[in-house]
Image: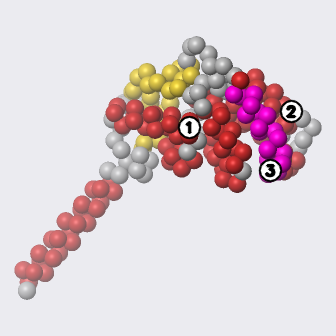
Amino acid sequence: MQYNIKRGICLILAVAMTLSLSACSGAKSMSEENIIETVAKVEKALMDFDRVTLQNYVKSSTLKTILDLSKNHSQFSVLGKAMFEKLEIEVKSVDKKNKTVTLLVKNRDMSDIASRFTKELVKGKNVVQLMALLNNDSFLDAALSKLTAEISEATVPDNPTEVTVSIEKGKDNLILNFDETAEDAVSGGVLTAIKNSFSMG
């Protein structure tokens, strides 16, 4: 009887240790292979505008704003797909020690288009009026369809933009941290213009 109790305690401890070890190793290791795999996953998620994957694999304040808006307004999902349709991301180098990855990014140059759109959007409006427009489906249908059409005409430059992105471990996967430079590169200037629309309002 005492032997069985000891055996049972040992079994419970072994299971507990296994669970704690698996919990600690839940996030992928900071290996070059996993970093490259994460970049490829993020590239595809941006092109598909896959909200779930982007929320889990990317930290970006402006992208988060668009993702949040797209929950209730499908127009922003359509805009997202248009923005990232021609996106190309190539890993140039990986720095595991400093937890960074240097990327070569190509996308349509949409900075002028986005800037014009932003200026028209915020002209003569305060923050309350601006937020009301961003929740008005009739306005979004007209404004974002026009913006999307203009984006489809933008060209991709010959030379890529080089950006360095920091990486961190999430609960189950690696996460890319997009600062303003990275946001600007992957979106061809659109994310920065959208960020400016809120600050200008």
Q: Position of residue 75 (x, y in %)?
A: 72, 45
Disc 1, SS: helix
Q: Which residues are magenta?
A: 134-152
In percent of the image, x 86 and y 33: which residue is there?
A: 120
Q: Is residue 36 left or right of residue 183?
A: left
| Count of labels in the image | 3
Q: Which mark is residue 120?
A: 2
1 vs 2, front mark: 1
Q: Nearer the viewer, mark 3 or mark 2?
A: 3
Secondary structure beneath label 3: helix
Picture coordinates of residue 77, whole percent (x, y) = 66, 44
The disc, 3 or 1, on the residue closer to the chain's N-terminal end is 1
* Vertical relation: 196 (above or below) 157: below
Residue 37 figure quarter: top left
- Res 106 quadrant in image: top right
How many angstroms separate mark 3 from mark 1 (CA)? 23 Å
Three-letter code for the amino acid on which mark 3 is drawn: Asp
Q: Residues within 10 Å of mark 2 (few under 14, many from 20)?
A: few
Q: Can residue 180 be seen?
A: no
Query: Which element type, helix, strand or loop, lies under badge 2?
Result: helix
Seen at 76% across and 33% down, the residue is 147
Q: Earlier in the sequence, mark 1 or mark 2?
A: 1
Mark 1 burial class by Cα count in 10 Å: few <14, some 14-19, many 20+:
many
Q: Which residue is mark 3?
A: 137
Q: CA distance from mark 1 to mark 2?
A: 26 Å
Q: Mark 1: which amino acid?
A: Leu
**Can you name the residue that lies furthest to the bottom here?**
1
